Image: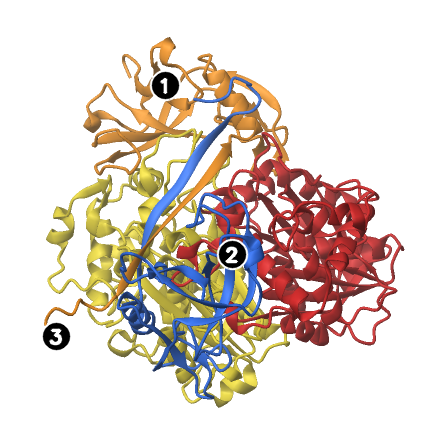
């Protein structure tokens, strides 16, 4: 069960649980659209479009209810290159985390870019959605982005 | 469209984190002794109370407890409950008795099972003695004591 | 949570931008699997650009969070603060989140009730308390819940017989003598004297707040009349000028997750002598029509969104003295007590509120 | 508002792995030491407040066990924040300002060694849109560093310079985990970790605990020859919607600094809670620190980063230098959340 060293008892332990999260109308609508292969954002009272659809305006705290369709292509605003994925990462090969501002959106969204190698990544590059083979109404329905 | 799937109202998010848990110095010493079939607690130099299992400190006095005190595997039931529902992560089949047992020579009860007696006959003040598991099953756990049983004539 | 916050703002006649600081209370992050949820909830809480503090003091957290919020205003540095507490237990399973079997835990795993039930037995044996007392409390609180549309458990035909016949969980605790697992939130707006005087609805004036804690387990700890609760009550009573709680306090909201705590608290809080609490329960004094209504809202036994439960007690006490408790209003309530409890009889928070400005 | 001052501070050895010692066993020595340093016991303490995070140790109610390290019979006035203990200090100050306390004990603690820290911190993010993608803390900080590089607001040499200075300063801090004499060239020759960050741009994983005493004016003067007076303190939150933030800036730090009154003070020392090298550069700018200010003379978080204590440590280190007469006026900063989402700024003075 444990190490034989009597002064140091250690044991591995997994804190594991599948959380069931209710989405509410805004996130629920975004994920429903995503399942259909469409991406929507919400528009704030001063006209900014937040993607993924945000429930509340970060500036005014107002509830957001107006949905706006945006493109599935956009531009990388910043990125980090994960040369060695950790166990939790969904892509088990070198990839980028990136903020991607989709055409029609004012605020970039966080996702992954599968570009093969770091040299293929640059800020300002255009990327487009690679849809998951099976879409279930989750942010992972976008498998990742890829260079456009 | 009649075949439109229902809107998304929820998601499932599995979260699994791995930890390498360490027992702590005081507990390590306790578990090392219990593996040898000995119950060794600690005495607080402030209030002189003996703690089993020890925590390396007295929460009343806020000072380290270093003096080790070996105690016997016999004591009294300070209070108890009969657990009627299955407890997640605990294979013991209900109903079973979980009791605060004050071992002789100690000053704070420890929570353990009482068995080998009709649950209805367990009472506050009952004298009990440890029923150890077979020696070959002993490990770094208080469960080397399978449960406490009534002492004859109690 | 957002709903509760919006209603509290509306009740106080203010908007998000009038709020100087946010104080959030919540029990373990493992219930929702979100670490420091105030970080991602900042937009929903209107928290951006504001000071945010996150309190966690076990089950008492809702109460101790309200105490911290009161300190914000008391300090003189803040005029109006919003304090919010919540729990969404349905996202996980509270029993799981509270008792994953950690390695090397040296005691038998008997669940939360396995820890608390032996002390209730001690209480019963020490003072010769009849078994049905716990059931009387369970019936009373569920009857009160029927008058509170916000209460989670609504059992229209609740009866002594139904409680007595509900399954035993941890002797002497029956199923209907224990609290449910709830989702819920509570929000309060606390304001300084100037803003409170101008608020559209009558305010509840805070006469005194207090918290006390001690170690979970140490030799000589009294788990029936815990020293930390005695100290907490003494402190609040002194601040609020309460010398005779039974006579002065009109209504109390006490954190009673298992019915047996009501008689035990009545004694510890000085409403009666030791060993007399159960007689007060039996006499009907603590019912809605009695002279010392306890948990007119239905209490924790009717709704237990853990992180919010303590703040609900504080908030319900305030509603009573504001005369806004609706169907469960205690007529003429002027002075009320809110109380919260957490840990292994270790964490307590209380406040006393009044309809009259001190 | 009543005046308050830091009058004592102790931190444990900053270690990658604390061995058998559990959290309470890490807390008790620092709590005892800080109280002994001014000659008080728990009975003299009016209010005790701690900062910790359950998910770091993988069990609910981490702080309940932590409380065993403190004398609690008779019961104490106590609270806990699920945050860095710098915010526990803030809660204690509210008690002092309100007249509810004169002497407060603060402690922060954690062991990050048992768990997967990068992934634990993922759980601070939006549980619907972010967590399912498992963006880890290092990758998010790297997004911020890249944004700064792209904006031309720093170079990789600037980042290496921060690390070099941290390692060198840490040579004089006996509690530091990482200390060395190194050069910008040697650091830039290291491979990248999560690009553009190199391993040394990231704070290490550290086990430990810290304790601090803060007192109202009369008590501070009675117990301490040269208290570190808290002249101003403020903290502010930014949006959790990562894309809505300009990651190259920290407006919450700037605002908190203005409220705390940094401007116009003769600041000679600063301790900035920057778990990543580029964040120190953002913070210096937002705080308006001149080049003459000694930044992170302790080595900062890059030299040892006890989660939930590292922010308190910044205040403790500034206060210690003031109490020892090595500084007259300092700024301390603490942060919480991904990419400096929430920031606290304090000004301390002799």
Nearer to me, C302 or D55: D55
The residue where tag 1 is placed is: B145
| Chain represented in orange | B
| Chain represented in yellow | C
What residue do we see at 27% from left, 13% from top? B153
Q: Is residue C189 above or below residue D175?
A: below
Residue C28 seen from this side: no
Q: Chain of mark 1?
A: B
Q: Is residue D343 above or below residue D209?
A: below
What residue do we see at 26% from left, 55% from top? C180
Left or right: C303, with D316 as reference point: left
Dot 3: element: loop
The residue where tag 3 is placed is: B1
If you read the primary sequence from the N terminus, does the residue marked by circle 3 or circle 1 appear first?
Answer: 3
Dot 2: element: strand
Nearer to me, A86 or D276: A86
What residue do we see at 26% from left, 30% from top? B91
**Residue B37 position within the rendered picture, expressed as x and y whole percent measured from the top left:** 44, 13
Both labels 3 and 2 in a single chain: no
Nearer to me, D292 or C290: D292
Question: Could you tell me which quadrant the N terminus of chain A lies in?
Answer: top left
Left or right: B120, with C345 as reference point: left
User: Which residue sits furthest top?
Assistant: B135
Q: Colour of chain D?
A: red
Q: Residues within 10 Å of mark 3 (few under 14, many from 20)?
A: few
Q: How many marks?
A: 3
Mark number, residue A96:
2
Q: Quadrant of residue D327?
A: bottom right
């Amino acid at each position: 069960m444990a190490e034989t060293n009597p002064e140091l008892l250690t044991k591995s332990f997994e804190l594991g649980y599948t959380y069931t999260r209710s989405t509410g109308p805004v996130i629920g609508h975004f994920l429903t659209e995503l399942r259909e292969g469409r991406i929507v954002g919400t528009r704030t009272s001063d006209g900014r479009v937040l993607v993924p659809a945000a429930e509340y305006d970060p500036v005014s705290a107002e509830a957001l209810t107006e949905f706006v369709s945006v493109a599935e292509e956009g531009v990388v605003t910043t990125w980090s290159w994960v040369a060695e994925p950790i166990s939790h990462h969904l892509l088990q090969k070198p990839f980028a985390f990136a903020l991607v501002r989709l055409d029609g959106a004012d605020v970039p969204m966080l996702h992954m870019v599968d570009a093969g190698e770091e040299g293929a990544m640059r800020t300002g590059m255009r990327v487009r959605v690679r849809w998951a083979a099976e879409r279930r109404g989750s942010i992972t329905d976008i498998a990742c982005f890829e260079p456009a | 469209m009649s075949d439109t799937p229902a809107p998304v109202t929820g998601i499932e998010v599995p979260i699994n984190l791995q930890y390498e848990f360490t027992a702590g110095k005081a507990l390590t010493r306790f578990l090392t002794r219990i593996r040898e079939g000995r119950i060794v607690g600690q005495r607080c130099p402030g209030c002189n109370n003996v703690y089993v299992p020890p925590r390396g400190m007295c929460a009343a006095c806020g000072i380290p407890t270093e003096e080790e005190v070996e105690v016997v595997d016999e004591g009294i039931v300070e209070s108890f409950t009969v657990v009627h529902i299955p407890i997640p992560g605990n294979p013991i089949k209900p109903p079973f008795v979980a009791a605060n047992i004050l071992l002789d020579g100690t000053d704070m009860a420890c929570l353990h099972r009482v068995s080998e007696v009709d649950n209805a006959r367990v009472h506050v003040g009952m004298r009990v003695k440890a029923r150890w598991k077979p020696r070959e099953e002993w490990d770094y756990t208080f469960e080397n004591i399978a449960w406490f049983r009534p002492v004859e004539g109690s | 949570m957002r709903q509760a916050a919006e209603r509290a703002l509306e009740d106080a006649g203010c908007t998000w931008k009038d709020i100087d600081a946010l104080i959030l209370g919540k029990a373990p992050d493992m219930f929702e699997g979100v670490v420091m949820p105030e970080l991602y909830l900042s937009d929903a809480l209107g928290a951006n650009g504001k000071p945010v503090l996150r309190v966690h003091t076990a089950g008492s957290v809702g109460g101790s969070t309200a105490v911290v919020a009161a300190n914000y205003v008391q300090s003189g540095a803040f005029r109006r603060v919003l304090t919010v507490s919540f729990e969404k237990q349905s996202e996980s399973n509270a029993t799981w989140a509270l008792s994953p079997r950690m390695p090397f835990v040296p005691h038998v795993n008997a669940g939360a009730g396995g820890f608390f039930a032996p002390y209730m037995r001690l209480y019963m044996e020490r003072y010769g308390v009849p078994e049905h007392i716990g059931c009387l409390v369970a019936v009373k609180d569920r009857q009160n819940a029927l008058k509170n549309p916000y209460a989670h458990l609504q059992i229209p035909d609740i009866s002594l017989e139904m409680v007595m016949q509900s399954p035993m969980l941890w002797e002497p605790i029956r199923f209907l003598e224990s609290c449910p697992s709830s989702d819920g939130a509570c929000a309060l707006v606390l304001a300084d004297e100037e803003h409170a005087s101008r608020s559209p609805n009558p305010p509840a004036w805070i006469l005194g707040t207090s918290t006390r804690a001690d170690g979970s387990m140490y030799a000589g700890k009294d788990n029936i009349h815990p020293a930390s609760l005695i100290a907490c009550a003494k402190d609040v009573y002194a601040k609020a000028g309460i010398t005779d709680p039974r006579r002065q306090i009109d209504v109390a909201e006490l954190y009673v997750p298992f019915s047996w705590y009501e008689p035990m608290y009545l004694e510890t809080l000085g409403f009666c002598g030791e060993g007399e609490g159960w007689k007060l329960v039996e006499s009907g004094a603590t019912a809605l029509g009695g002279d010392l209504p306890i948990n007119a809202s239905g209490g924790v036994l009717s709704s237990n969104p853990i992180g919010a439960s303590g703040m609900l007690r504080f908030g319900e006490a305030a509603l009573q003295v504001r005369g806004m408790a609706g169907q469960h209003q205690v007529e003429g309530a002027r002075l009320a007590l809110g109380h919260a409890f957490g840990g292994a009889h270790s964490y307590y928070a209380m406040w006393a509120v009044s309809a009259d400005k001190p | 508002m009543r005046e308050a001052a830091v009058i004592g501070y102790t931190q444990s050895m900053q270690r990658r792995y604390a061995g058998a010692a559990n959290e309470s066993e890490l807390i008790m020595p620092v709590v005892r030491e800080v109280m002994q340093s001014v000659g008080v016991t728990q009975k003299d303490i009016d209010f005790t407040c701690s900062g910790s995070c359950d998910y770091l140790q993988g069990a609910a109610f981490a702080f309940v066990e932590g409380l065993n390290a403190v004398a609690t019979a008779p019961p104490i006035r106590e609270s806990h924040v699920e945050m860095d203990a710098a915010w526990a200090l803030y809660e204690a100050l509210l008690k002092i300002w309100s007249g509810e306390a004169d002497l407060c004990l603060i402690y922060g603690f954690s062991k990050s060694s048992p768990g997967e820290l990068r992934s634990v911190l993922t759980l601070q993010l939006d549980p619907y849109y972010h967590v399912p993608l498992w963006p880890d803390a290092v990758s998010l900080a790297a997004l911020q560093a890249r944004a700064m590089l792209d904006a031309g607001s720093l170079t990789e040499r600037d980042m290496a310079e921060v690390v070099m200075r941290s390692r060198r300063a840490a040579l004089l801090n006996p509690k530091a985990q990482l200390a060395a004499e190194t050069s910008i060239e040697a650091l830039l020759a290291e491979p990248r970790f999560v690009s553009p960050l190199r391993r040394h741009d990231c704070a290490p994983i550290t086990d430990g605990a810290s304790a601090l005493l803060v007192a109202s004016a009369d008590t501070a003067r009675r117990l301490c020859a040269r208290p570190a007076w808290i002249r101003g303190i403020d903290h502010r939150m930014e949006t959790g919607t990562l894309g809505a933030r300009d990651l190259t800036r920290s407006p919450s730090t700037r605002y908190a600094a203005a409220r705390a009154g940094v401007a116009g003070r003769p600041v000679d020392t600063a301790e900035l809670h920057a778990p990543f090298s580029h964040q120190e550069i953002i913070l210096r700018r937002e705080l308006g620190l001149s080049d003459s200010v000694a930044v992170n003379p302790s080595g900062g978080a890059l030299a040892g980063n006890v989660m939930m204590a590292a922010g308190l440590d910044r205040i403790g280190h500034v206060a210690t230098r003031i109490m020892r007469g090595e500084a007259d006026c300092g700024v301390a900063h603490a942060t919480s959340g991904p990419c400096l989402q929430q920031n606290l700024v304090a000004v301390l003075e002799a």
